[in-house]
Amino acid sequence: MYRYDEFDRDFVADRVAQFRGQVERRISGELTEDQFKPLRLMNGVYLQMHAYMLRIAVPYGTLNPSQMRMLAFVGRKYDRGYGHFTTRQNLQFHWPALKDVPEILGHLASVEMHSIQTSGNCIRNVTADHFAGAAADEVADPRPHAEILRQWSSLHPEFIFLPRKFKIAVTGAERDRAAIQIHDIGLHLKRDAEGRLGFAVYVGGGLGRTPLIAHRINDFLPEADLLSYCEAILRVYNQFGRRDNKFKARIKILVHEAGADEIRRQVDEEWERIRHSALALPVDEIRRIEAYFALPASLSPRPARSVVLDRAVAANPALADWLERNTARHRISGHAMVTVSLKPIGGTPGDVTSDQMDLLADLSERYSHGEIRVSHEQNLILPHVALDDLPALHEALAAASLATPNAGLVTDIIACPGLDYCSLANARSIPVAQRISERFGSQARQKEIGDLKIKISGCINACGHHHVGHIGILGVEKKGEEFYQLTLGGSGDEHASLGEIIGPGFSGADVVDAVETVVDTYLKVRSGPEEDFLAAYRRLGKEPFKEALYGAA
Amino acid sequence: MYKPAKGTAQKAVIANRLDDGRTVFLDEAGNWTPDLAEARFVVPGPELDAANARAEAELKARIIVDPYPIDIVEVDGRPVPARIRERIRAEGPTVTYGEAEYEKLRAG
Ligand code: SF4
């Protein structure tokens, strides 16, 4: 795992000390709220419905056990014994007191964590495929490049005051699990015919008020040019991005208005000027950073079948279900990647208690070579588990309500905090997710429905990625009450698409029935169980669903 | 204390406490209470102006942040914020969380 160098350590320590002073000055009255607000936001502190919220960066979604234990400790000591993992692979605490935040940040710094660039118009935490470095289908681990981007973008003086926030996502597999096409820059690490590493570069994706899928502006960018090319994109954006209108200030609008060809031309022009500068990455340096992300030396191939596992599965149907849904093929024989579901039936998506965090830290040490990942789908991953260990791991997770066998199923719902916590929300997300989860909670029913991604946002900011949900749910406020708009057919993977609004919205009381109608309609119209929801929707369009929801026109 | 006022819109002033961010309401004494039932209920006009002025002073005195007046309606004889946003702010999240959530899930 990557470790901070001295620069990182000093820099984070300085920032904690600086923020401590700022909080003291705010509380003593030297700073007004107007003066203080930008400072607290630069340190990940928001003021929400009921309290302050602290957002902590988890770079490329990778955590080690000491970091997880520290999050558990902070949750217990300074919050209410739990935290919330977000679609940006970050962790949010909903209840810290402002006066405690500097102390919390001090604790976090001791395990190389911080909240810098988790807010504001800067380059945010770089996100990555949660199976990075372990997936059997991966060309190469994209996290070393994500780390290089992290170092480059950390307080880059030119890019601290961008027109708007800027999000970068990376994947190293054809199968896009990092939703790169809905990011400002999406990077797909691949090899060319000669076996050299480079990136397909996507620009201008994003959700929110104006959802847009990114355009590919470079089919193969050699890895050595990663920083100069990204810098060129940022420069074009910084110069031409619409600062006059907050709603038009993301790079997606610039790309949309100027056209991908024109943006490509501008980026290339800028890139030509700087590509041979100090930004050119020495390949030795990339390989040096890669070494930090190497698979653990103790992770050696084992037989592809495990007698222990086969025997346990035969005796335990719950284990069989979990194995089918929550494990995926590892690149090293005899191992699996395990999805720890943070979606118990009827629970809050993405929430995890301090006790569960401590347990996961222990289990990662015992069974996963001390690695934990956060997925943008608000689950956790134990990436390197030997097949022989799966029965014991399953038992330990199940005892802590962490073994719901629903990864990728209808109850594996993404939901933002919504109006239960978030001051920008128009409607609640969590209770809707809970009711849908309960409605479809039977394992047999979920299995019959198969792969189906439901994503819920409490407002148009779309933190819950509703536009790319197979079924998307957007909370709106109508005459002081909560209403929910349904979109169908969205997808955040390599075949990204935006969901289409299906018709008038539904009240809070009716929205779960509406979702059930959509699902039942799918079951009726699909060509067979092998045709999943998205495929059926793409084949048939919205008509059958519209008719089922609103009656024949 | 809350007195249902026939035909007049009642208001209260909501804010977050500066040091811990908790939702609070201006009370009769000009202090802040987390309990809406203890809030100062006012009608538009001089009463509301006085409440807003007090909140403004408390903002300057760095006791609270982000004060604003909200509409209050009566439900079952109790004062309740008119909008769902402030109802949730007054009563806390509508979902259980943390250990309590898991206890509920295990029991249910
Ligand atoms: S989508 Fe809206 S309600 Fe949900 S977390 Fe984002 S800003 Fe808040």
Image: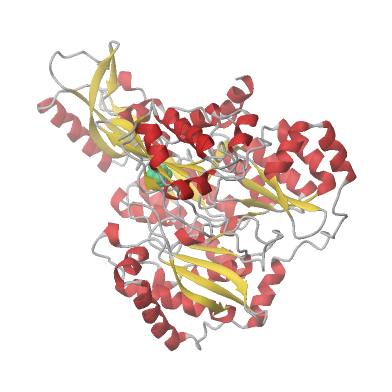
Q: Position of residue A140 (x, y in %)?
A: 67, 68
Q: Would you say residue A345 is visible in this rendering?
A: yes
Q: Nearer the viewer, residue A29 or B50?
A: B50
Q: Kindly indicate the quadrant of the structure image that contains residue B85.
A: top left
Q: Is residue A200 left or right of residue A459?
A: right
Q: Which residue, as the protein is rendered here, is positioned at the far left? A: B45
Ligand 1 rendered quadrant: top left
* In this rendering, position of residue A473 left or right of residue A29: right
- Residue at 45% across, 64% down: A123
Horizontally, residue A356 falls left or right of residue A52, namely: right
Total of numbered circles in the picture?
0
Residue beneath the point at 60% across and 25% down: B105
State the residue at coordinates (54%, 38%): A349
Residue B21 visible from this viewpoint: no
Residue A436: x and y, percent?
50, 31
Task: Report the quarter where the N terminus of chain A lies.
Answer: bottom right
Quarter occupied by residue B53: top left
Q: Please identify the residue farthest to the top as the structure is shown.
A: B77
Residue A416 coordinates in the image, percent (x, y) = 46, 42
